[in-house]
Image: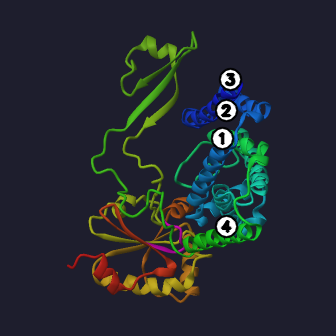
Amino acid sequence: MQQNILKTITGWAIIIVTLFSAWLILYFQNFSLPFLLFLIFELFVIIRFRKLFSPAMVTVSRYLLGLLFLFSGFVKGVDPLGTAYRVEDYFIAFGLDWMMPSAVFFSFVLNAAELVLGGLLVLNIKPKLTAWLVMLMMLFFTLTTLNDAFNNPVPDCGCFGDALLMSNWQTFYKNLVINVLVLIIFLNRDQLKVSYRNSTEWTLGFALIALFIGFQYLNYINLPMVDFRSWKVGNRLFTENPQPVKYYLTFKNNETGETKEYLSPDYPFNDAEWVEKWEFVNQRVEDPNRIPGMDLAIIDFAGQDVTNDYLKNPDYQFFVVAWDLASTNTESFKKIEQLYKQAEGNGYSFIVLTATLPEKIQYFLEKENLTFDMMFFNADDIALKTMIRSNPGLILIKNGEVIEKWHYNFIPEWKDLEEDYLDKK
């Protein structure tokens, strides 16, 4: 009896420590040998004492893992085009450029797989088969993120889409923690009891697949139902009351090797003896006004940065975002042309942002027989993809606040814009 109580306490303690480990990941953005060894030790403990876990513990682990998979799959599935961009990053990093056209397909498959497995875990559908599939998926993800952590082929794997950004080391640590739950389930899969008849399980399984693929498709042909980026509707794109930017300078003593950091200009630059002994090493900038993910720079064809002229326009400002005119939806530009003429007639600014070079812009206009003289500006393609998941897409802002965004499949009529969004002049 006492031994059973001790086993129960130990089993639950391991699960609690695992959850605590997940929280600790927030504090380990880079490589940490002690933390890595601690996580590996957790995995060893699970394998060594796998018989400690009762059916209740396995069930709790199954729910925790299922909900995590559902969350992770949802935040990526709600933005399948964003996931495709990250798949493209991996193709480029591994020299698989020829696979770029399949990025959207792989995005749908990976997101759906994660969502479906999460649903199967929570509903306890085909539990033993699901345990095997989850184990194989996590083996693949763990090896991939291990390579990411050591070699940094991509800056962010996008494991939680844009909802939660993590360093490559944090992502690898996260997968090790997840593997604790996976091993609890996998090594005790014989405890998982079937909840439905075989035919019902297959029906529910295929229903989940169809549901989640349909969910992704709706987000693909329109904008994401939930936007986690800086350019989401309602966000302000600049700080109204900017605070001073702080510059920290690090100097090294040539004699002792000691380093010191100073807040500029509070360092003894007038002391000749100090200047002789100390040399500048690097600079660190703290900008309290920077909005994460807001890296847009609007450049005119003379090379001038005109970002603030349009971003801080106190009146309504229309942005047409077409990161690549060679692959843009050309039919939608016919409708955009009509909107431009209406906006111009009513005194509103209406510009196009693209990463396409000027000579190719002219070729595009002539090829598509577009006659409008709308102003084109260059911007970084990554910044444009962050602004809106549509090529082209339409964004309406006013005084730096995002009023509304439209996918090219749903470009509005001018009368609807006037009625729903524009103040009557």
Residue behind mark 4: 108
309 sits left or right of 172 in the view: left
Q: How far separated are the C-alphas under marks 3 and 1?
A: 19 Å
Q: Which quadrant of the rendered structure holds the N terminus? A: top right
User: x%, y% of residue 295?
Assistant: 47, 54
Q: Which one is nearer the viewer's eye here, 403 or 319?
A: 403
Residue behind mark 3: 2
Q: Is residue 20 magenta?
A: no
User: x%, y% of residue 274?
Assistant: 45, 13
Please state which amino acid type lies under the numbered disc 3.
Gln
Seen at 71% across and 69% down, the residue is 200
Q: Which one is nearer the viewer's eye here, 311 or 96?
A: 96
Please state which amino acid type lies under the numbered disc 2.
Gly
Residue behind mark 1: 57
The range drawn in magenta is 388-394
Seen at 42% across and 23% down, the residue is 262
Residue behind mark 2: 11
278 sits left or right of 207 in the view: left
Q: How far separated are the C-alphas under marks 2 and 4?
A: 37 Å
